[in-house]
Amino acid sequence: MNKKISILSILLLAMQFAFAQNNTKEVPKLFQPSVLIELFSSEGCSSCPYADEFLKEVVQISDSSHTPVYVIDYHVVIWNRSGWVDPFSDSAFSLRQQEYLYRKKINTLYTPMVFVNGGDKEFAGGDKRSIGKAIQELLTQPSKHFLRTGITKVKEEDSLLVAYQIWGNVDSCDLKVAFIQKEINNMVTGGENKDMILHHHNVVRGLFSKPLTGAEGYMKIPVDQKLNLDNYRVVVFIQHQGTWKVLAADQMTFKP
């Protein structure tokens, strides 16, 4: 059997099973789970294009099946001295990756690296089988938290207003808002991927955070008013300040 088809089949079956299960069972104070996949990558890393393609497949499956599995890709600066400066990289994303390693007691920093719902184990970005299994397990476990969001432009301001409502305990939690670009194609002229056109998906262009003090509210994020939002999404998630576990996530896509 084709390995690629096998992994995609596992993902799709897990998503369909979780959706059916959570729409037929009435479990008090438990909700349909969501899964956030955080990828740390770089245009200067020769292994990252493979991870990019795999996670593109996950995005396509989750979008087409309307299943709450969300992918976000942070470009880090680790490879910027290796012959190519990644134009989408940000030192703040490198700090986030380093903080994950510190909190999870992981000794080796590398790309492409993936965390699923802020779990205690990291995955290599191209490890389809392990990431697929993690998604499957999380989708079949009802969650103690649920998040719903809405978004609107702020009139005559370079900003968007994100509204949120949360079910579940939000003590010691942060609300994170990732402004992401859905598709980027870029020609690389140096480093390990020299002369390649790289295809990126759900690239984080800004990450914003605030401590949660209640179950509902608003958060304003800066976004250029002139930007065409057709190629952008917003992913919102709840992260525990101590464990860094991601408790719930939601995604919004702008309509053309």
Image (cartoon, rainbow, N blue to C red):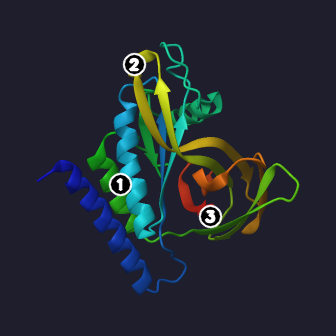
Point out the frontmost of discs 3 and 1: 3
Residue 73 in the figure: left or right of residue 140: right
Task: Determine if residue 42 is in view.
Answer: no
Taking 93 as reference, is 86 above or below it? above
Amino acid type, mark 2: Glu
Amino acid type, mark 3: Lys
Residue 6 in the figure: left or right of residue 182: left
Residue 178: x and y in percent read 63, 49
Regarding mark 3 in the picture, which secondary structure is present there? loop
Task: Report how far apart the C-alphas of labels 3 and 1 lie in the structure.
Answer: 31 Å
Amino acid type, mark 1: Ala
Disc with the residue nearer the chain's start (2 vs 1): 1
Residue 177: x and y in percent read 66, 52
The residue beneath circle 3 is 255
- Count of all numbered marks drawn on residues in the image: 3
Taking 44 as reference, is 81 above or below it? above
In terms of image quadrants, where is residue 132?
bottom left
Task: Determine if residue 19 is in view.
Answer: yes
Point out the frontmost of discs 3 and 2: 3
The residue beneath circle 1 is 134
Quadrant the C terminus occupies: bottom right
* Picture disc at residue 192: 2
Disc with the residue nearer the chain's start (3 vs 1): 1
Crowd band around label 2 with a 10 angstrom C-alpha radius: few (<14), some (14–19), many (20+) = some
Residue 130: x and y in percent read 30, 48
Residue lying at 49% horizontally and 20% vertically, measured from the top left:
79
Point out the frontmost of discs 2 and 1: 2
Crowd band around label 3 with a 10 angstrom C-alpha radius: few (<14), some (14–19), many (20+) = few
